[in-house]
């Protein structure tokens, strides 16, 4: 038995070159028919394209791709067919049957084998059938997606054949959907009915469009009835998914508002300082990310995927240090005078903006997304973008880390003591001035790391912080001044409310309505959702 197996293996090995040669001869026979000039005889060319696809040759797809791309030429003297790409002053030639290079040649010795729109459609269909049998799973998925979009009934045999051989469940599902789309465009009523069930199970907007188109065509009464029912059910399902998508967008906006407001909640809650330069701390964090990425691009490109992890501590230190300098140099002389702190910090914000313009220029700077923050994925009909999802996770991580610092550290204890009763804290030996400085620095540092995150979804420019300062104050006041839980609830509430209002009234009017609602709410609860407690507050 072993000898018999060895004999067949040896026979197959020896016969392989002859089989390949036979395939090449068969392929060349059909490729020669592509040179047909007469439009009336293009039927022969169409048959030749189909025969090339069915030849089983590994070179069938490259030849058809070259023909589709206008790279298939014939020599003017003897009609030899070659694949040509432009290279320098001449042409780079390759053999269509082996793929081997044939050197270069002047441009005037070859003429292009013409292809029209009708032939292009046939070529794409045949190429799709070839890709369905490809070894690479991603290629098969791409082919199935392409055939789903084209929904050409002529692709039904190729899809049925591919489905029989397919073992990957995901690819099989996509091929089944492509087959259903093609069958829905056919005239077979039974195939159309089964296709309606498959497309209803898919349940997305593309399937809905296909079913609505089927209702307009001259289909049978039963097919139209089934399609109408499927359309109603898909619309109802999509309405629920649309609500879910809006909620995700709202949570995403809420996480951005939380990052922007969380530092302000600390400074405003402890010191009562209206810090109009808070947005510029966010801007500094974003520009720190830009500088870090520029250094990595030129010095260590392999570290680009960890550029944000490097930028986070640097942004915190730089923005925090600037915050401490502002508090020690200006703010500490203005306590108890909120209007003057507002004007002073507004002036500081203008100085910081102009400094950034002088150093980096007034235009937007490019900040790239690491690979792990790029792309998106689907959950049902929800589209979840990776960068937004990571920012939501990051915002919660910053919030809970900050809560732990305030609750379990000596610095947090002193900060809470100053917040609740500044005079009593001072009489107990707490240096309230330095607590103010470090608190202002902490709030500014948190704004800096917020800028690192926001650089992934917004333009990095000198005006970056101005886009968030008003929203940050609204979140802090609505949630309750100095209360981190209130900041979280306020940010999420305003983010979701904004996203539900925008489709109905527009983005600008939506923000105005949110502002009006907050004003009305503060009339009833002046201290916000979660009022800060303490003797100083109660006085």
Image (tube, rainbow, N blue to C red):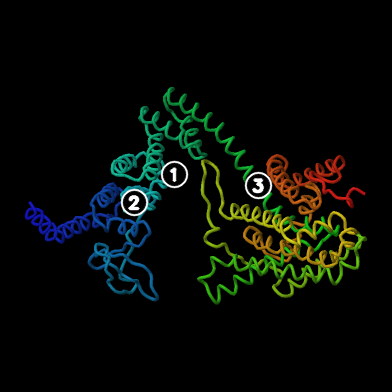
Of circles 2 and 1, which is in front?
2
Judged from the image, the secondary structure of the residue bearing numbered disc 2 is helix
What is the CA distance from the residue labelled 3 to the residue labelled 2? Answer: 40 Å
Point out the tag, 3 or 1, that comes first from the N-terminus.
1
Q: Name the residue under label 1.
A: 149
Q: Position of residue 17 (x, y in %)?
A: 15, 61
Point out the tag, 3 or 2, that comes first from the N-terminus.
2
Of the numbered discs in the image, which one, if any, rests on residue 251? 3
Contact between labelled residues 1 and 2, with CB atoms less than 8 Å apart: no
Total count of labels: 3
Of the numbered discs in the image, which one, if any, rests on residue 131? 2
Q: Where is residue 175 in the image (x, y as percent from the top left)?
A: 37, 42
Judged from the image, the secondary structure of the residue bearing numbered disc 1 is helix
Q: Residue at x 52, y 32 (%)?
A: 234
Left/right of residue 235 with respect to residue 72 in the rendered view: right
Left/right of residue 199 with respect to residue 372 in the rendered view: left
Residue 147 found in image quarter: top left
Point out the tag, 2 or 1, that comes first from the N-terminus.
2
């Amino acid at each position: 038995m072993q000898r018999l197996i060895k004999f067949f293996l040896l026979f197959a090995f020896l016969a392989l070159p002859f089989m390949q040669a036979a395939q090449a001869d068969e392929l060349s026979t059909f490729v020669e028919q592509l040179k047909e000039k007469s439009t009336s005889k293009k039927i022969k060319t169409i048959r030749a394209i189909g025969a090339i696809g069915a030849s089983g040759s590994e070179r069938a797809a490259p030849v058809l791709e070259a023909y589709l791309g206008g790279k298939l030429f014939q020599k003017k003297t003897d009609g030899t067919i070659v694949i040509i790409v432009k290279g320098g002053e001449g042409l780079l030639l390759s053999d269509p049957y082996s793929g081997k290079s044939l050197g270069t040649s002047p441009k005037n010795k070859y003429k292009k084998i013409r292809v029209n729109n009708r032939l292009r459609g046939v070529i794409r269909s045949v190429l799709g059938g070839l890709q369905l049998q490809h070894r690479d799973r991603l290629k098969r998925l791409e082919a199935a997606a392409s055939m789903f979009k084209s929904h050409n009934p002529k692709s039904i045999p190729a899809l049925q054949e591919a489905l029989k051989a397919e073992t990957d469940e995901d690819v099989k599902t996509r091929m089944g959907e492509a087959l259903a789309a093609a069958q829905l465009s056919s005239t077979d009523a039974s195939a159309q009915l089964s296709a309606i069930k498959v497309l209803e199970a898919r349940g997305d907007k593309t399937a809905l469009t296909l079913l609505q188109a089927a209702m307009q065509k001259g289909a049978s009464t039963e097919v139209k009835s089934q399609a109408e029912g499927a359309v109603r059910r898909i619309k109802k399902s999509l309405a629920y998914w649309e609500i879910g998508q809006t909620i995700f967008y709202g949570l995403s906006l809420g996480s951005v508002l939380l990052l922007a407001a969380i530092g302000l909640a600390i400074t405003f809650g402890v010191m009562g300082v209206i810090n109009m330069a808070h947005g510029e701390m966010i801007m500094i964090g974003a520009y720190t990310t830009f500088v870090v990425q520029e250094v990595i691009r030129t010095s260590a490109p392999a570290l680009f995927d960890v550029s944000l992890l490097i930028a986070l501590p640097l942004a915190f230190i730089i923005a925090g240090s600037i915050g401490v300098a502002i508090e020690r140099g200006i703010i500490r002389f203005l306590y108890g005078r909120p209007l003057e702190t507002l004007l002073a910090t507004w002036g500081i914000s203008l100085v910081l903006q102009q400094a950034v313009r002088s150093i980096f220029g007034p235009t937007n700077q490019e900040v790239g997304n690491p690979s792990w923050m790029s792309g998106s994925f689907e959950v049902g009909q929800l589209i979840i973008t990776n960068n937004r999802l990571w920012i939501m996770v990051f915002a919660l991580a910053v919030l809970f880390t900050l809560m732990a610092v305030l609750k379990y550290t000596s610095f947090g204890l002193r900060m809470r003591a100053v917040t609740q009763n500044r005079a009593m804290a001072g009489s107990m030996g707490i240096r309230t001035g330095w607590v103010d400085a470090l608190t202002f620095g902490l709030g500014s540092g948190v704004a800096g790391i917020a800028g690192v995150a926001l650089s992934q979804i917004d333009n990095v420019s000198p005006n970056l912080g101005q886009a968030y300062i008003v929203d940050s104050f609204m979140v802090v006041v609505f949630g309750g001044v100095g209360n981190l839980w209130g900041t979280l609830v306020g940010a999420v509430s305003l983010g979701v409310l904004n996203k539900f209002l925008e489709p109905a009234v527009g983005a600008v009017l939506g923000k105005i309505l949110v502002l009006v609602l907050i004003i009305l709410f503060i009339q009833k609860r002046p201290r916000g959702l979660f009022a800060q407690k303490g003797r100083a507050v109660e006085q």
